[in-house]
Amino acid sequence: MKKSVRMLYIVLGLLFMAIGAVGVVLPVLPTTPFLLLASFFFSKGSERFNRWFMGTKLYKNHLAEFVQNRAMTLKTKLGLVATASSALLLSALLVDIIYFRIFVVLAMMFLYYYFAFRIKTVKPGAREVQLANDSV
């Protein structure tokens, strides 16, 4: 892969990591999707950056559980669904094309299905309890 493309991936990874970090502080900005994007771009850009990112407290606290177990807390799921739904509804209201609005409705149906049935819901702190049980 060209060096310039790898650098672009690393820069995008840093950008999305920064946005995700801001999302930790601002409750209106979701953290998980931006950290997922950062993880994707770091994995494409550099093995070294990817290892570094996976070692950060930001990754461990907000993304590691989802990556390992395909599970999220109810609060995280609701926050992601609410943010995605808001963006989809806003775009459907702004675009006056019936086929686009049908697409948005189908996308929202898939979103709700995926988060309800494909991603497990765990209680906050469930990872710590599981780790303590595993060590006994």
Image (cartoon, grey):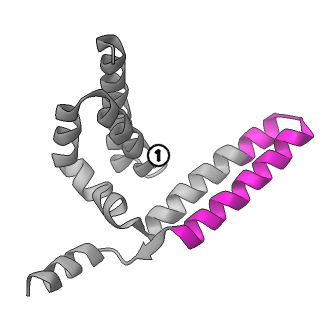
Quadrant of the image for the C terminus? bottom left
> Disc 1 marks which residue?
29
Which residue is at 28% across, 57% downward?
64
Vertical placement of 132 versus 65: above or below? below
- Residue 43 lies in quadrant: top left
Q: Is residue 56 visible?
A: no
- Residue 62 lies in quadrant: bottom left
Vertical placement of 123 versus 2: above or below? below
Vertical placement of 14 versus 84: above or below? above
Magenta stretch containing residue 131, yes or no? no
Vertical placement of 122 versus 97: above or below? below
Which residue is at 57% across, 51% downward?
83
Secondary structure, mark 1, is loop
Percent x, y of residue 46:
24, 29
Which residue is at 21% across, 47% downward?
54
Quadrant of the image for the N terminus? top left
Question: Which range of residues does the magenta coloring cover?
Answer: 89-118
Percent x, y of residue 5:
36, 16
Percent x, y of residue 33:
45, 47
In the picture, measured across the screen, residue 135 lies left or right of residue 49, that is: left
